[in-house]
Each structure stands twice: as C-alpha cells, then as structure tokens.
Image: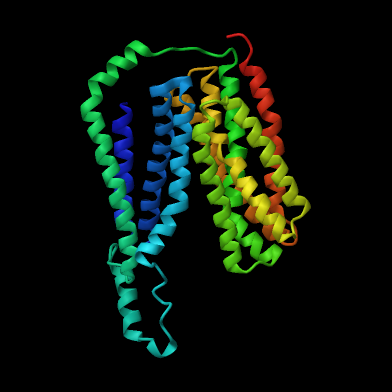
Amino acid sequence: MNHFLLLGMAMLATTIGLYLVPFCKRAPLLIAMMSVFGVSFGALDTGANVLILALWGDKGAPHMQALHFSFALGAFLAPLLAKLAWGTRASTQNHTESDFDPLMLNRSSEATSDSLFAVPDDMNLLWTYASIGTYALVVSVFLFGLFCKKRSRQKKSAASGQRVQRAKYHWALLCLLFIFFFFYVGAEVTFGSYVFSFATTHVGMKETEAAGLNSVFWGAFAACRGLAIFFATFLQPGTMIVLSNIGSLASSLFLVLFDKSPLCLWIATAVYGASMATTFPSGVSWIEQYTTLTGKSAAFFVIGGTLGEMAIPAVIGILQGHYPDLPVVLYVCFASAIFTGVLFPVMYKLATLPL
C-alpha cells in the first residue's frame, strides 16, 4: 500500500477520534474511540518507520532520529500547550455544597443514559481536543497531497532503486529485536508513567516537585533525541545503542542504590531519560544495515515494543501493590537495562555473520 496514503488515512482516523472523544457520553463509545486511536497510532508508528527506511535505507539514521525526536517533542509539549492555551481544569473545581443543584444532576444523568453524544460541560476540554485534532487534520491533508502528487514517481523509484540483502539469521535477528524492544519500550514507558507516584509515595516529594521530575525525564528524553539527529551523522547506530545501554545501566543502578535520595533521583532521572532517548531509532537504523526490512518485518518488532508498553507497566502496578515498601519500578528498570545490555552483543554477533 502506498506509504503516504496509509499515513494520511491513519492521521484522518486520529482526527475523527480527537473530534468525537469530548462528545462521548457512554463508556462503550469512549472505548471504541480510544480503539480508533490505538489502530491509527499503530499504523503511524510502523508506517513512519518503514517510510524512512524506504526513502533513505541504511543511510537514514539522522532522519530516523528526527522522526522519533518529533514523537518525543510532541509528547512533551502537547499537554503543556493545551493547558496554557485553554486552561483545562475539572468542571467541579469551583463548586461548593451550596452550589449543588439536584435538578442539574437529574438532567445530567438523563443525558448520560438517553444519548450517546452530548456537548461536554467543560468547553475548554472540547477546544483542547479540537485544536489538536485540527493540527492532525492539516497533517493528513499534506500526506494526501503527497500521495496524489508523487504516486507514479514513487512506484518508479521503488521498482528501480530497491536493494535487497538478507542476513543469515534474518528471523532470529527479528525475534531478538522483538524481545529487545519489548523490554526497552516497557522500561521507558514504565518509568515515565510511575516516576510521579514513586517520587511522592516512596521518596516523599511534594506533588509540584514530582511533576517537575516527570518533566525532567521527558524533557531530557526529547532534548537528547534532538541532539541525536546530529550525532547520527558521524556515529554508527550500533555505537549509539552501546552508549545508551551504558547510560541506562549506570543511571538505573544509581536509582536502585540511592532510591531515597532526592538529589540522586533528579540527576539519575535526567541521565536515564537522555540514555533511553536514542535506543529505538538507533535499533531500527542498525538492523537495516544488515538485513532489508519490509513493512511486515518492521511491524513485527514494533509489536514487540507496544506489547512491552502494555504489559510491563501493568505487571509493575500489580507488584507494587503487593510490595508497597519496595521500589519495584526501579528494580524492573534496572533489570531491563541489564537484559538489553546483554542482548545487544548477541544480536550484533548474529548480524555480522556472513550474508
């Protein structure tokens, strides 16, 4: 399928979901809308990586870093911009008991039970979703424009310029990369999701400080991905993966050893975020040096990352509930750093065997 058409359709589905979510008044309908998000995000994540590889092949390391930098920058800025622009807040924040109106409650419950869609009480919520949805719509229009303009040219270049090489243990490499990304992405999302709760409950930070800690992690993550665009022009992807593994291992070790120290938590969190930043795009660029990736093979190891993103935080949530006095989040991140640090040399050995 044409890359631009697929990405344009995924962005259009994202736009529709963003426009409709604020109007959902039933949980099943909201679940359906979030499922649309999941499908479109999966297509965007896989399709964008494959598009970079199709355009630049094993020379596309800086472009791959730029793509993933845009992911990190958007994840860091979008909530902040939405809050600054629209001032989203809970609609019940300014209500007291004297403002309570039983009639309003009855109307609200009737609207919830009788209708699938309704205008939200907090219009700031609506405008926040609408503004981001409009941005996604503009991007989808550009992608459809590229599809209409360059369709024939893309077919010719794909037919004439494709270079295929296959590693001796092609599928073994893909399976190992699947496992590698499972633990890497799982640890990245787990730390980013739980660092706020960990800082407040285990270290005793104030909520404002813990929120700043969360911003430090994602800010360092986005900044290092931006710098990686330039580093990728003179460093090999394998070298960047090794440096990232060393940084992740050292910072997660310090987090485990000094889990009660606020100063260590600030420093190690920034180092951990910076170390985790370049691993995924470098991994995709690295494997392309040794074996040609198709859409199916790229989707295979991307699924490994998304499974880790889904499973590891859920498991940690259960374990943390059973062992509330232990820093389970830090233990799992440290174990993941050890595992990925050991697994990469094995993958490198397999990849460098004769073609």
In the image: residue 35, left or right of residue 269: left
Extreme-left residue of the structure: 148
Q: How is the image coloured?
A: rainbow
Q: Is residue 242 visible?
A: yes
52 to 276, vertically: above or below: above
- Image quarter where the N terminus lies is top left
In the image: residue 164, left or right of residue 133: right
Location of residue 325 in the rendering, given as x and y in whole percent from the top left corner: 75, 62
Determine the residue positioned at 41% across, 54% down: 78
Determine the residue positioned at 66% across, 35% down: 245
284 to 159, vertically: above or below: below
In the image: residue 312, left or right of residue 131: right
Q: In the depicted view, which residue is nearer to us: 30 or 283?
A: 283
Determine the residue positioned at 60% across, 63% down: 210
94 to 310, vertically: above or below: below
Location of residue 170 in the rendering, given as x and y in whole percent from the top left corner: 56, 17
